[in-house]
Amino acid sequence: MKVKAVYPGSFDPITNGHIYIAERAAAVFDEVIVSVLVNERKTSAFSVNERCEMARESLSHVKNITVDSFNGLLIDYVRQKNAGAIIRGLRAMSDFEYEFQMAMMNRKLAPEIETFFIVTDPKYSYVSSSSVREVFNFGGTVKDLVPDGVYNKLIERYSVH
């Protein structure tokens, strides 16, 4: 039986920490869909199309990963994709508390769908999309925290460096 998993997130932008989690998931599951969340209540730095394109480029070396986008309830999307698992990355204990609550809610809504937590590499434990954008905007170096294509998009978007 082939198992398909969905790795959802805003990926605004995708970081090396996200890529690490996606690669680890791809080593365990037959197919992984990296799904970019469209959240109208949140202002994103990059459009959903830009975020999807950065993710596709950054993950093109992994053959069993595809990139898609979704809005609405994650469980509905996972069912629509006929996936049996949700992947969530953990950086710190504070992530676990939030992710645990979300996993329990998803389990209540869809007991047939499992949530799997993948712990990041310690070198990415402090990396988030928002911290990358903030550090970049203040002139700090983030080149080793994001793929080259994402770094170039940051330069293009913010014209700072």
Image (cartoon, rainbow, N blue to C red):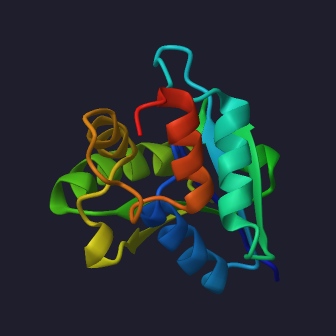
In percent of the image, x 54 and y 29: which residue is there? 157
Which quarter of the image is occupied by the C terminus?
top left
Whether residue 77 appears in this view of the structure is no
In this rendering, the count of numbered labels is: 0
Q: Residue furthest top?
A: 41
Q: Nearer the viewer, residue 69 or 17?
A: 17
Who's the residue at 73% across and 58% down the image?
57
Q: In front: 127, or 153?
A: 153
Residue 157 vertical placement versus 133 (above, below): above
* Residue 72 screen position, x and y as percent: 63, 27
Q: Position of residue 124 (x, y in %)?
A: 31, 68
Q: Residue at x 66, y 53 (%)?
A: 55
Quarter-of-image position of residue 96: bottom left
Q: Is residue 43 left or right of residue 27?
A: left
33 left or right, relative to 73: right
Question: Please, is residue 121 above or below residue 155 in the view?
Answer: below
x and y percent of residue 134 in the render?
29, 36
* Side (left or right) of 113 relative to 76: left
Q: Quadrant of the N terminus?
A: bottom right
Most extreme residue toward the left, as rendered?
93
Picture coordinates of residue 37, whole percent (x, y): 60, 35
Question: Does the rendering let one see residue 81?
Answer: yes
Question: Is residue 147 shown above or below 72?
Answer: below
Of 12 and 95, the residue lying toward us: 12
Quadrant housing residue 50: top right
Name the residue: 50% across, 24% down.
Answer: 44
